Amino acid sequence: MASETAVRRPAVAGRFYAADPRALRREVDDLLASAEPGSPPVPKAVIAPHAGFMFSGPVAAAAYRRLEPAAGRIARVVVIGPSHFHPVRGVAAPGATAFATPLGDVPVDRDGLETALAQPGVITDDAAHRDEHSLETQLPFIQRVLGDVAIVPLVVGSATAEEVGRTLAALWGGAETAVAVSSDLSHFHPDTEARALDARTVAIIEALKGEELGPENACGFLPIAGLLWHAGRHGGRIRTLQLANSADAGAPPERVVGYGAFEYAEAAA
């Protein structure tokens, strides 16, 4: 599908996070300040949640704070998450040239996008991006931690882990590229049941067993499985940084959403 507009406008500003630039800057900076400081080695990839910042913001901050020492070195972030609203066959890239947030426009890396579109199953579909929050909620953290970087935004629909993994492999690059996978964990279980399910999901992720992930584990199970598919062929390890759910932020414990922050470090050369 052709691009509907040159800049993809925010869909959840004022709902998932502050719409006012100064308020959003303060919101994100406070979350990052409360997270454990980043230190070498800087991870190649992180997994972070995408709910409203009042719920999942502290967990997302735990992931993005780990990238902080690489500010100025990282020039491109591949941001990949699930499609919540629009049916996608494969992986959807945008036609837009930038994604806007209240903090400013984030340019789309055109070379990276062309590389993605050359992979099997990757298409251009702006409708998949129009209302999607899984990528949008990552951008304020990326902007505050890494500054002026470009993104390769990808929304995953009915794809396979191998298709996603091969697309990530094509975009992997070197020290100039980071990968941000957007996903919440379990959805709408009672608190105790959710924590048990999320603990099993953590074990699967840390063991790089993406083939064992399904929609009951995480809404972004396919983006995560794609990262694990690639990681399983190139070594390295996944480490859990933080685990929580919406009840920890004061939501009703009868139906919670799980949140996890993870980092992937490549194997030493």
Image (tube, rainbow, N blue to C red):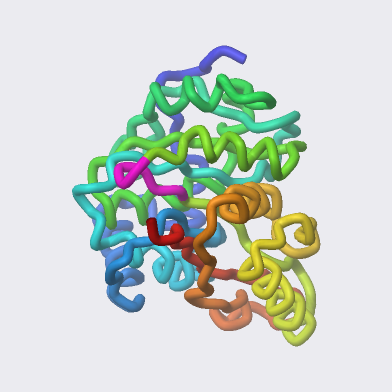
Image height check: is 213 above or below 242?
above
Residue 128, located in which quarter of the rendered image?
top right
Residue 254, located in which quarter of the rendered image?
bottom right
- Which residue corresponds to the image point at 45% horizontal and 23% vertical from the top-left? 96
Residue 124, located in which quarter of the rendered image?
top right
User: Residue 216: percent from the left, percent from the top?
Assistant: 80, 63
Give the magenta part as a residue range. Answer: 174-179
Residue 145 part of the magenta-drawn span: no
- Which residue corresponds to the image point at 62% horizontal and 62% vertical from the top-left? 184
User: Residue 122: percent from the left, percent from the top?
Assistant: 63, 26
Q: Which residue lies most toward the left here?
A: 72
Image height check: is 146 above or below 36?
above
Tell me if 48 is positioned left or right of 107 in this view: right
Image height check: is 48 above or below 105?
below
Tell me if 97 is positioned left or right of 148 in this view: right
Task: Give the quarter of the figure containing the N terminus.
Answer: top right
